[in-house]
Amino acid sequence: MTQLAEGSIARNQLDVVEPDQDCQANLKIRTRNGNNVFRFAMPVKDLYHDTVVQALINDGWEITADPLLLSYGSRELYVDLGAERRAIAAQKNELKIAVEIKSFLRPSPVRDLEEAVGQYGIYQTILAEIASERVLYLAVPKRSYESIFTEKLGQLILKRLQLRLLLFDEEERRITQWIP
């Protein structure tokens, strides 16, 4: 059974699954008899989503969730990726990360920073409650780090909010640096 907003229906009763014309990030689902139209908010993938996935795989990570669902109370949020690196002999536990990807392509890098930091803070807070073993990283293109994050404002945000960054080269599809 699938739990939906207006009750439960069996998966075999679903007929139509299509993008919602009002918002590309929603799906419309109808029952076979045409009743009950349900809408689900679906996360929109960032421009560099596939690039970061490939960079993580190239760096030895296994993608375990795409996206990573965070359920808290009656709310569901989606971090772009969940990944794990299996333990090696010198480590006792496997490493688990959550990765939120941001392009920083708007005309205002400060607005991009505000949005990214806001999401990061919410996800970090929820992860601390429900999956404290998972470390959150904000994935940004190296060029973005070299602009807004190296400025005085960016350095202050990194320091005070203790953001962890994953820098990637969007052309070479590789991770260039982990901060911290």
Image (tube, rainbow, N blue to C red):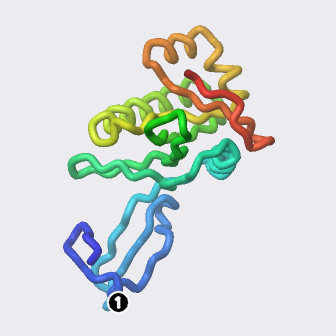
Seen from this angle, which residue lies furthest front? 89
- For image coordinates 69% across by 20% down, the residue present is 147
* Residue at left offset 74%, top offset 36%: 169
Residue, disc 1: 32
Asked whether residue 97 is in view, the answer is no
Q: Is residue 51 left or right of residue 71?
A: right
Q: Residue furthest top?
A: 152
Residue sitting at x 46%, y 35%: 136
Task: Give how far across and how far down residue 11 sits, in percent.
Answer: 34, 82
Q: Residues within 10 Å of mark 1 (few under 14, many from 20)?
A: few
Quadrant of the image occupied by residue 118: top left
Q: Nearer the viewer, residue 174 or 157?
A: 174
Which image quarter is the C terminus in? top right
Residue 171 on image: x %, y %: 79, 42
* Local secondary structure at mark 1: loop
Q: Answer yes or no: is residue 176 visible.
A: yes
Residue 62: where, in percent of width, then height?
57, 51
Locate residue 44 relative to residue 177 in the image: left or right. left
Residue type at mark 1 is Arg
- Quarter of the figure with the N terminus: bottom left
Q: Is residue 28 left or right of residue 165?
A: left
Write down the quadrant of residue 172 in the picture: top right
Number of callouts in the render? Answer: 1
Seen from this angle, which residue lies furthest right? 172
Residue nearest the observer in this picture, 88 or 63: 88
The residue positioned 41% from the left and 38% from the top of the image is 134
Q: Nearer the viewer, residue 32 or 128?
A: 128
Residue 27 location, x and y as percent?
44, 68
For this view, does 108 lie left or right of residue 117?
Answer: right
Q: As rendered, which of 120 and 165 lies closer to the eye?
A: 165
